[in-house]
Amino acid sequence: MKLDQIDMKLEVTVIPVTDVERAKEFYSRLGWRQDVTPPWVVQYTPRGSHASIHFGEGVTTAEPGSGRHFLIVADVVETHVALLAAGIEVGPLYHPTPDGVVEGADPERRSYVTRADFADPDGNTWILQEVTTRLPGRVESGSTSYASITDLSAALRRAAIAHGEHEKRNGGEYDENWPDWYAEYLVKEQTGEPLPQ
């Protein structure tokens, strides 16, 4: 079997920390699930994620605070508000432009563009990135999935808005095949294919 035929799924990334108990308190405040592990390692999994983080005494020789990771969210503005409400210090929303980084959400709310950063007590950086539609080829068509009820709910809302526009273009008539249209929209949005009109 060739390497391009073998599935390799990211399971865990290691976070270097100086104080395990302080890190546990921080990641618990984020609402991440603490998983059952051997006593020498601590594992947390973000809600809706298939991958987890590890930290603990002697788990890594990396410098505490050297971690830099991305967290994908369906609505970065909503997530930003929730983090602030939970007492997490998070920087302002920002987005890149041809002239440099600009503070605030992308005016068009394009997928992959709007971001915000926060750090754990050791300085490991987490970059929130809003992704609603994947780039073509980023998700295989046979592997579409929703990691949480929140993700699916947000996708259904986007599909409902797009379907409303579809019905308007077709004279405002009720679309009896709306389940098929929604299904096509949801799959194509995840796989980065052109969306139905």
Image: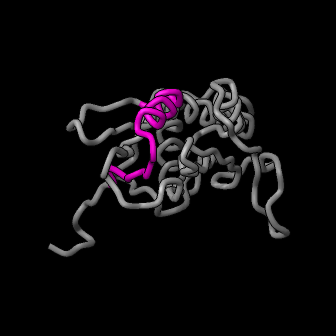
Marks counted in the figure total: 0
29 within the magenta span: yes
Q: Horizontal placement of 151 versus 110: left or right?
A: left
Relative to 159, 144 lies left or right = left
User: In the image shown, does 12 or 109 lie closer to the viewer?
Assistant: 12
Task: Please say whether residue 74 is one of the residues in the magenta stretch.
Answer: no
84 sits left or right of 156 in the view: right
Q: Position of residue 8 (x, y in %)?
A: 27, 60
| Residue 154 picture quarter | top right
Residue closer to the observer: 63 or 27: 63
Percent coordinates x, y for residue 60 in the rendering: 34, 56
Q: Position of residue 134 (x, y in %)?
A: 54, 54
* Residue located 30% across and 32% down the image: 35
Tell which of 32 and 87 is nearer to you: 87
Q: Residue furthest bottom?
A: 2
Spot occupied by residue 97 in the image (x, y as percentages of width and height):
80, 64
Above-or-below relation of 114 to 167: below
Residue 151 visible to the viewer: yes
Residue lying at 25% horizontally and 60% vertically, measured from the top left: 7
Whether residue 47 is visible, yes or no, is no
Q: Which residues are magenta?
A: 10-32
Q: Quadrant of the N terminus?
A: bottom left
Q: Residue at x 74, y 35 (%)?
A: 168
Coloured how? one colour
In this view, the residue in front, 127 or 39, is 39
